[in-house]
Amino acid sequence: MLEAILVMALGAVVLGAALGYAAVRFRVEGDPLVEKIDAILPQTQCGQCGFPGCKPYAQAIAKGEADINCCPPGGDEGIHKLADLLGREFKSLSAEHGIEKPKSVAVIDEQACIGCTLCIQACPVDAIVGAAKQMHTVVSVQCTGCELCVAPCPVDCIRMVPIQETVDTWKWKYPVVPIRQIA
Amino acid sequence: MMPKLFTFKGGVKPASHKDESADAPIRVAPLPSRLIIPLRQSARAVARCVVEPGQAVRKGEVIAAAEGPMCTAVHAPTSGTVLAIEPQPVPHPSGLPAPSIIIEPDGKDRWIDLTPFDHLAATPQQTRDYLRDCGIVGLGGAGFPSHVKLGPGEKGIDTLIINGAECEPWITCDDRLMRERAEMVLAGAAIMRHVTGARRILVGIEDNKPLAVESMKAAAEKLGESAIDVIAVPTRYPAGGEKQLIRVLTGIEIPYGKLGTHFGVQCFNVGSAHAVFRAIAHGEPLISRILTLSGNMAKPGNFEVLIGTPIRELLPLAEPRADTDRYLMGGPMMGVALQSLDIPVVKGTNCILAGSPTLFPPPPPEMPCIRCGECAKVCPAELQPFQLYWFSRAKIFGKTQEFSLFDCIECGCCSYVCPSRIPLVDYFRFAKGEIWAREKEKAAADVARQRYELRLAREEREKEEKAAKLAAKTAAGREKAAATLAVAEKPAITPEDAAKKALIAAALERAKAQKEQVHPGNENNLTQEQEAEIAAIEARRTEIREMAKPHLRQDD
């Protein structure tokens, strides 16, 4: 009887020590869930979800403070991926946060630009170059199409241009069978 | 001695249809009315245009220079004038326009001064650079730059394979080339062997081209080369696929993610060997190629065509029949439908095939997959097309990659045997395109994330710096004020309050001084009358202020 208790107690102590050691040794820094959610988000940094960037939105989703259908640039596909990751039901994009648009880049009308730097301050990814009272321009490969620079421009010289399909970006379409009248 | 041959798994034997065009000798196509030369000659690189509209060019002159490691130069196919540099439809499944140089021929066909290149005196690197500047790319279809393939690779090249298999039905341009210019092809192969340092050359030709095999064997004997083996390989589509031909000739099976060079084998098309010979021995850049016009045509044949010739101007040579309803670029197995006939011939164009409802009937409706496994039996890459189809159709792209989608060579064997007539390759191309697009998007998102984080860090740092600066300034001001106050010593107020007051007083003093310094610019150079007027107005203002004083609140 006593032996059994001692054996069980010893086992508990040994296993407890092993678990305690593992908890310290293999501690996970940061929240891996936030990282995973952030990897799915499109990194447009547009703030349409109501958070100041993709990472804060990811943190809010991880805490359960935000829903998964608030990201218009991610679209339905992004929501599907988030739903899969978090084991939730798919929801269609929430209308109050905007609609999914074709990917665009900002273009500055360089003739009209007065060099106020307001768009440079608004750009979340530093994709606009220029200086005070000098013409500004968008580095289009780095533009995420967040539209945050459009509103601050005092002379309305920034417009969003959808990205045109070129030979390099063209993709094979999903095969469809044309329906024909046979009788 | 007949070396031992190996086999690859799968493959099909479609009707070869080579006889239609194989017997007519190569004819030189007449000069077209204009030439459209795309700057984008392969999927990987765009050359940099070095001519201007209106400029006169001679045949063989460089009109676009190689830029980047995967790029080759582009040359004027004939003498004439550059009309424009503008986007034109290019031979691409999308039919979208891409930047092209348009040349109007002057009809004189004047060459630049041609100087042969002595590859025996040059280092391999110099020869490769020379071939790059001659615009030599693989003429089998993909247009991969030859100077890159001629590089030493990781372990060096032991075996050079010259691909004359030409396994696609209908196409006979390599067949004719080997029959008529066998010596040039082998001389080109010998140059390639010298550049790569290979030990032996294997020429693989499908055994349905006995005349080509004979001609190549005779040429090899004539050259007196013992290390060149011309080998007839069994006719089975796709024996001309690079990995399949390497497998048949050497028995080496190239695994996923590896290339022939990892095993000391490199493979070139016979047309590329011919182009290398012309570049080295005659100094001629790659400005023309041989292509087959066949299918629903009255006079099918092979033609030596200038790069940039619009296909519309080429067709009358073979006289397409009246019921032709579409044209394919490439063979019936892998070719893509032409969106427009204004598309030019490029370096990778090996065949233009005319189709009619009787010759190539439109595909019957797609039926559900019954998982019969026929596609897996014929797949030369040993994949399971029915599984890939399932996941591609359902857009589960991760699974398609698990089933090695990217090993698919899009040969079309699976679609050919499918009893449900499913266009399997279309699904695989779709899935590949989507996966590539997602990878690109992901890379762009990673860059955006990094830039956003860097920006946040910078903003944080700037804020801290500003706060530190401000704190330093205030501290300095307070010390100064406290020092002046220490002299006055008023116990009623604490030194800190006094410091604040002193600071405010100093600021007010500064503001006042600044105000006095500034005076309106329109008060310069005034007449006496105007000065008098101003004085009167000022007097009235003071009067009014005096009058208003009792009515104003105390703190104003």
Image (tube, coloured by chain):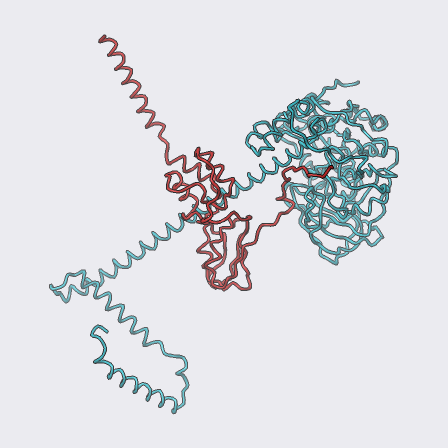
How many numbered marks are there? 0
**For chain A, what colour was chosen?**
red
Quadrant for residue A160, please give it: bottom right
Q: Colour of chain B?
A: cyan
Residue at image position (37%, 53%) is B462
- Answer left or right for B376 relative to A146: right
Task: Place residue B13 in its image quadrant.
Answer: top right
Q: Residue at x 64, y 35 (%)?
A: B429
Instruction: Give coordinates of residue B493: x percent, y percent.
Output: 14, 63
Q: Nearer the viewer, residue B63 or B86?
A: B86
Residue A64: which quarter of the image?
A: top left
Is A176 on the left or on the right of A35, as rendered? right
Q: Which residue is farthest bottom? A: B529
The image shows residue B399 at horizontal and vertical percentages of: 56, 29
Q: Is residue A75 left or right of residue B37?
A: left
Query: Does residue B257 appear in this view?
Result: no
Q: Give percent across and percent down for residue B18.
A: 83, 31
Q: Is residue B275 above or below residue B36?
A: above
Instruction: Locate residue A84 relative to residue B464 in the image: left or right.
Output: right
Where's the N terminus of chain A, which quadrant?
top left
What residue sits 49% from the left and 53% below the top? Answer: A147
